[in-house]
Amino acid sequence: MTAAAPPGVLRSPPAPEWTWEYRGYEPGEERLREALCTLGNGYFATRGAAPEAAAGPVHYPGTYVAGCYDRLVSTVAGRQVENEDMVNLPNWLPLRFRPLEGPGPAGPAGAAPSGPAGAAPADRGGAAPCTAEPAGAGRWISPDEHPPAEYHQCLDLRGGTLTRRAVFPLPGGGRLLVEQCRLVHMGDPHLAALRTVFTALDGPCRLEFESALDGAVTNAGVERYRDLAGDHLTEVRTGAADGDVLWLSCRTRSSQTVIAAAARTRVAGAVPEDPRDLLEELRAGRRAVLPLEPGRPVTVDKTVALHTSRDPAIGSPLRAAVDRVREAPGLPALLDTHRASWDRLWRRAELAVPGEAGRILRLHLFHVLQTLSPHTAELDVGVPARGLHGEAYRGHVFWDELFVLPYLNLHLPEVSRALLAYRHRRLPQACRAAAREGLRGAMYPWQSGSDGREETQVLHLNPRSGRWLPDHSRLQHHVGSAVAYNVWQYGQATGDAEFMHTKGAEIMVQVARFWADRATHDRAGGTYRILGVVGPDEYHDAYPDAARPGLDDNAYTNVTAAWVLARAVELVRLLPAPRRDDLFDRLGLDRSEPQRWEEISRGLRVPFHDGVVSQFEGYEGLAELDWAGYRARYGSIRRLDRILEAEGDTVNRYRASKQADVLMLGYLFPPRELSALFARLGHRMDDGIWRRTVEYYLRRTSHGSTLSSLVHGWVLARARRAEAWAYMQEALVSDVVDIQGGTTPEGIHLGAMGGTLDFVQRCLTGLETRGDALWIDPVPAPPPSPELPHPSYELSVRHRGHWNIRLHMEGGRLTVTVPASEEPPLRIVLAGRPVTVRPGESCRLDLPA
């Protein structure tokens, strides 16, 4: 152990509007705090667990690398079930400590295992391997066994750090102040650091500490998965190098991904006594004793490097990790470059809303950027529904990019492009999935992971009844329409013709081919039908007492399929002739196929009943639910499906939705476009019909998903602003207060977080990217009310070649500022009125009443 930088955690406290703080230690809230205090950089993330904490009922340390999956087989309900998980990697955080009562440490004992071939040469700088306990050693201090007199955690959103201050009573009397600061470096995606400052407050003491890398971890962060296999790591090896560096390497069982971590530990403010290595089978640790004098802080800096065999431009992950941590600067320099990287990122993704709503939106944006940062643009990864913050949904990719990419398109389009490239690389797998069903085109999976195969489980556990039940979620084929929608929106926002004419066109065309083959012609009715699917609602996966799963003519599925078919026809028509010929030849497209897409896009069936759009064919035949009765009996009925199943009933019998289904159409399409879509399908969709449809499903939705309140707030924004804000308030705090009761500790809901940002960016502004212009049609400002946010907000967006266009809304006026550049003037269409703003100029516009 060598000298470190001078002690100290942070140079100055962050501004309150940029912090997320917890005071006092609450064991029952620890897992929620750990999820919300996760630090990451797009490559990997680490939950906000205390460094001395071990996994158990109270704590769950977890580190996850984007795209690092592994597959295991479990026996469930007498069946062999295979699941792919985002792997919980070796824990780099451990730094534990305890006071010593005796006068001196024990001598060395045992021997350290030798390092693997090719590792850095062992050089312990005089430190002897040791497994004996020192004289007078007691239990390691932890807030669970040694309740702190003071406890404070602070997440600095602007700087990307998590700090902690705790005062622990010592067994022999006196108090120990522990201050910590950690970061996961936003500039260098492979580095992380932890600074710990120990101060004896009352009298001298001798403190033993251990800095370690822990490979004895499993995937056990979700209660309902614990009967399933979770031991993904094997071939764990440990070693030491260069005197102050420890390392640990391992491999995932089936994907054979090699993971290596190296940690450098340095001390300042005291001369460590008896430094020694403990190189165990699953853990590499370094211990030393610190002589503490009252009021004199002693600093322990731990710097960590993490690599996997998925990384480009490396040979051995272990060599790369050891070299990287060996050459890493000290913590002050790391902190400076880390903060500078965050400053640049905040400038690109700026969003300013006053008050508490603005503070929560910053937290949401912080977690979106930690999961999907500029580093993501270099990776082959999708949008994990629960971020890199926990193991819920097994780290799988669903359709959540539908709610996240619209924000990224206007700030980090290179990240959006990379996330769409993830879908394009898995296009062959989606085409094979369709072919197995006898269909052409691409059938994207509802849940995706490493290679693009369907990862949706075949059984799921109802924790209320304890029964494992069939899972038909894989019938949510509308995920393909979401992928195509994201491609089109990216093209509209960026004007990236190269992508749209190549990878984007291939995705759009193959999803259109799938819908064309999936549709069945009903000769009697003269329409096309899509049978046997599940819509976004998710509660309804079959008709009551039906022998087969699936529903017919789900309105959301059919309307979005019609949209995809129409856009594919448009895109093919707009392609340059050489590219169009190449596309047709390479995909084996018949020249007559676009004509058939056009026909089907105008003929898909959309059911109606009682003057509203039916969620699916036959919906009106279902029974009405006694909503008041169930709320009186159960309180929260967000998971109504579990309640009814535990009663021996099924939600399939009732007009009850988990989340927005039909109303999702109002989220995706502005009124003008939605009306045109229905007209294309032979139906009228005016304000009256849409209003009745919204009212009908508002009364029949349990909001069992965090996305539901977001969508309802969006569709109500223009007509019923106070009610819309109530829904948005729920979406804002859904993770902050764990509104679903136990889900957020397993990982944040990235789609809901991204959607709340987009609510300000596109819904409140009425912002659309069409052609080469920004179209703006703001939601009218609500009347003054303490329940409603102040009608003032500011954001910056990137459109085509213009970076950081600033839009400021306040007092019925929009100010547009375009940065200086060589680009042509920016075209804006405000409520139908075209305006041009030259680079380097600002323009003030009065908003329509």
Image (tube, helix red, strand yellow):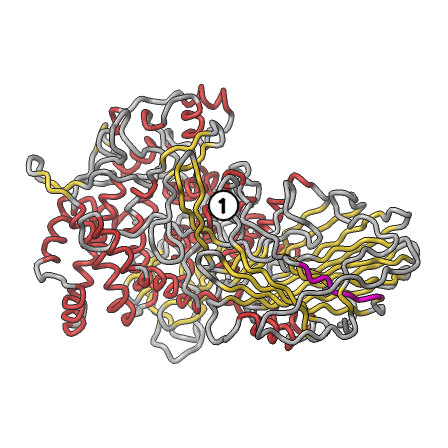
In the rendered image, which quarter is residue 186 located in?
Answer: bottom right
Q: How many numbered discs, if any?
A: 1
Q: Nearer the viewer, residue 16 or 29?
A: 29
- Locate residue 822, reporting x and y percent: 38, 80
The image position of residue 370, as x and y in percent, is 52, 60
Query: For the magenta stretch, what is the residue range?
Result: 274-280
Residue at the bottom extreme? 822
- Name which residue type carries label 1: Ala
Residue 680 visible within the image? yes
For this orientation, the residue located farthest to the left is 523
Q: Secondary structure at mark 1?
A: loop
Drawn side of residue 361 relative to residue 57, left or right: left
The residue lying toward the viewer, choosing from 329 and 569, is 329
**Would you say the magenta stretch is mainly helix, strand or loop?**
strand
Question: In which quarter of the view is residue 276 placed?
Answer: bottom right
Task: Report the residue at 13% width, 48% height from top.
Answer: 600
**Is residue 278 shown above or below 54?**
below
Residue 133 coordinates in the image, percent (x, y): 81, 55
Res 849 seen here: no
Residue at mark 1: 229
Classify mark 1: residues with Cα within 10 Å, few (<14), some (14-19) or many (20+): some
Figure check: 800 above or below 681? below
Going by the picture, which residue comes out furthest to the front? 110
Residue 41 placement, left or right of 455: right
Location of residue 845 in the rendering, given as x and y in whole percent from the top left corner: 40, 61
Quadrant placement of the N terminus: bottom right
Locate residue 289 relative to residue 734 in the image: left or right.
right
Q: At 88% across and 61% down in the image, what residue appears? A: 292
Q: Residue at x 32, y 30 (%)?
A: 696
